[in-house]
Amino acid sequence: MDKKVILSGVQSTGRLTLGNYLGAINNWVEMQEKYDCYYMIANSHSLTVRNNPEELRNNTLKILALYIAAGLDPEKNTIFIQSQVKEHAELAWILNCYTYMGELSRMTQFKDKSLKHQDNINAGLFTYPVLMAADILLYKANLVPVGEDQKQHLEITRDIAERFNKLYGDTFVIPEAYVRKETARIMGLQDPTSKMSKSATNLNDVIFLDDSEETIIKKIKKAVTDSENVVRFAPETKPGVSNLMQIYSAITNKGFEEIEKDFEGKGYGDFKMAVAEVVVGKLKPIQEKYNELLENRDYLVKVYTEGKMKAEKIAIKTINEVKEKIGIL
């Protein structure tokens, strides 16, 4: 029986965070045995904000290195750079013509990013969900690992695919969300009501995957908690402690009740140190492998070149099928 297809990716802006790892990449590693996986570095999506060209190039390679260092096997997965498969842009244009302005204007992420980047509200930011739809539909993905903040984009992808299929017959697979709830959203250390973000202005709010051991410990020690001094999972009333428990649980696989029991009668100082230790322990081998890979640029080029060729085979087949159906010679 054919394996179900999964597609996901991370933008090539900024440094990857612990949230990216626990909420996404770590789950991808588990999926590679069970699914036919396509993992891209979404550098075309990164263009909605102004980037330093050299940084964008370097970040693309760094993210590729982190994918592999975190456990993604290029032999078991199709790992590629989005912009190198031109069919993403081509299908995005076609799908733009089957997407309504009203649908795009309702996207909450567009509204949020427009507020943050008022000097650069560009058309790419507005049509971002259509490119995301093209990414997914190009590979006929059955499942898309998404965080809570991306669910709306998956819904519009489904709407576009259903609209196209209704007009031209079965063409696209209607994708479903793959959400692992317990680690779906790692929050900021200083603002535990907002997602841990690569673009955080307060560096103490976020743990980057390439942070040093000393930096990780300092950041976790400074993490916002509350005055109760009791380790208890209650996201509404104790968001800071609950977020640290989420992190600890994701790394140790311990349930919240077990964590509460382990730290009964102990204060936040002990708990924060325990969280820091497991984070450092988890990231150390990844960092070592990552640094080793960055020294071997030829290998990284080989991985993304082979990934591009594998992705192109599927992408070309899909775009040709779409063109045939809509009458493009």
Image: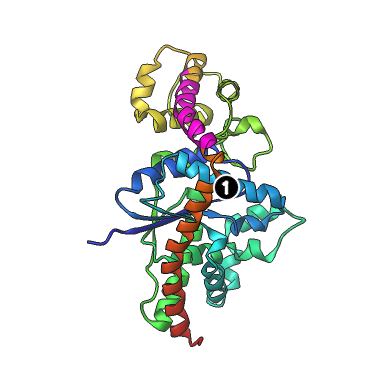
Q: Nearer the viewer, residue 63 or 104?
A: 63
Measured as percent of width and height from the top left, residue 157 is found at: 47, 65
Kindly identify the residue that appears in the image at 49 percent across and 63 percent down: 135
Extreme residue toward the left, this view: 1
Extreme residue toward the right, this view: 119
Residue neighbourhood size for the residue with mark 1, other residues' Cα within 10 Å, grouped as few (<14), some (14–19), many (≥20): many
Q: Work out whether 229 lies above or below 244.
A: above
Q: Work out whether 36 lies above or below 273.
A: below
What amino acid does circle 1 point to? Leu
Extreme residue toward the top, this view: 265
Q: Please tell me whether residue 273 belongs to the stretch shown in magenta.
A: no
Q: Which residues are magenta?
A: 274-292
Measured as percent of width and height from the top left, residue 260 is found at: 38, 21
Kindly identify the residue that appears in the image at 59 percent across and 49 percent down: 60
Kindly identify which residue carries mark 1: 61
Q: Work out whether 80 lies above or below 293.
A: below
